[in-house]
Image (cartoon, rainbow, N blue to C red):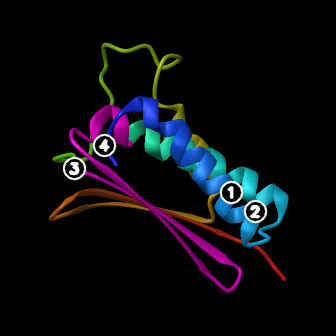
């Protein structure tokens, strides 16, 4: 989808509906929706042209991947007050059991995994 902040809510709603159809526990669904919101917002803000959301369920592990067409890992600006930006990655790191950011040929990939017991 185009990397536009107006489409972040569509990614969030899609995630909630899909995870409901997969019968994901409500607390994990809510965490996943918040993770998608933060990652899609970052991709829309910094990802230039397009972003892709992938949700993969493997037993009791949900893999969330957001890929954008950004050219590199952004560094926080020292000109911006910490209260204004930068909490999104902290939220994702707190909610997910693991996270990874890497540069791929098509752009930046951010992976987050949520897991739960049966």
Q: Is residue 30 left or right of residue 14?
A: right
Q: Which residue is mark 1?
A: 17
Q: Is residue 5 above or below residue 50?
A: above
Q: Is residue 34 left or right of residue 107?
A: right
Tag 2–tag 4 contact (CB < 8 Å): no
**Residue 61 locus on image (x, y percent):** 65, 77
For the residues marked 1 and 4, what is the alpha-carbon distance in whole angstroms? Answer: 21 Å
Q: Is residue 40 above or below residue 65?
A: above
Q: Secondary structure at mark 4?
A: loop
Tag 1–tag 3 contact (CB < 8 Å): no
Residue at image point 45% right, 44% down = 40
**Residue 88 locus on image (x, y percent):** 52, 37
Q: Earlier in the sequence, mark 1 or mark 3?
A: 1
Q: Which residue is mark 2?
A: 20
Give the label, 4 or 3, closer to the camera.
Answer: 4
78 is within the stretch colored magenta: no
Q: Earlier in the sequence, mark 4 or mark 3?
A: 4
Tag 2–tag 1 contact (CB < 8 Å): yes
Q: Which residue is mark 3?
A: 69
Q: Is residue 10 above or below residue 105?
A: above
Tag 4–tag 3 contact (CB < 8 Å): no
Q: Which residue is mark 4?
A: 2
For the residues marked 4 and 3, what is the alpha-carbon distance in whole angstroms? Answer: 10 Å
Q: Quadrant of the C terminus?
A: bottom right
Residue at image point 29% right, 36% down = 46
**Alpha-carbon neighbours of circle 2 within 10 Å: few (<14), some, or many (≥20)?**
few
Q: Secondary structure at mark 3?
A: loop
Which contiguous range is marked in magenta?
43-69
């Amino acid at each position: 989808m185009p990397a536009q902040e107006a489409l972040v809510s569509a990614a969030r709603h899609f995630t909630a509906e899909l995870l409901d159809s997969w019968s994901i526990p409500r607390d994990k669904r809510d965490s996943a929706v918040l993770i998608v919101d933060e990652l899609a917002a970052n991709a829309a803000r910094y990802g230039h042209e397009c972003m892709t959301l992938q949700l993969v369920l493997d037993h009791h592990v949900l893999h969330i991947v957001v890929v954008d067409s950004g050219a590199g890992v952004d560094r926080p600006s020292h000109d911006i007050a910490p209260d204004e930006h930068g909490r999104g990655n902290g939220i994702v790191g707190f909610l997910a059991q693991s996270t990874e950011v890497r540069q791929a040929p098509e752009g930046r990939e951010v992976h987050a995994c949520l897991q739960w017991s049966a």
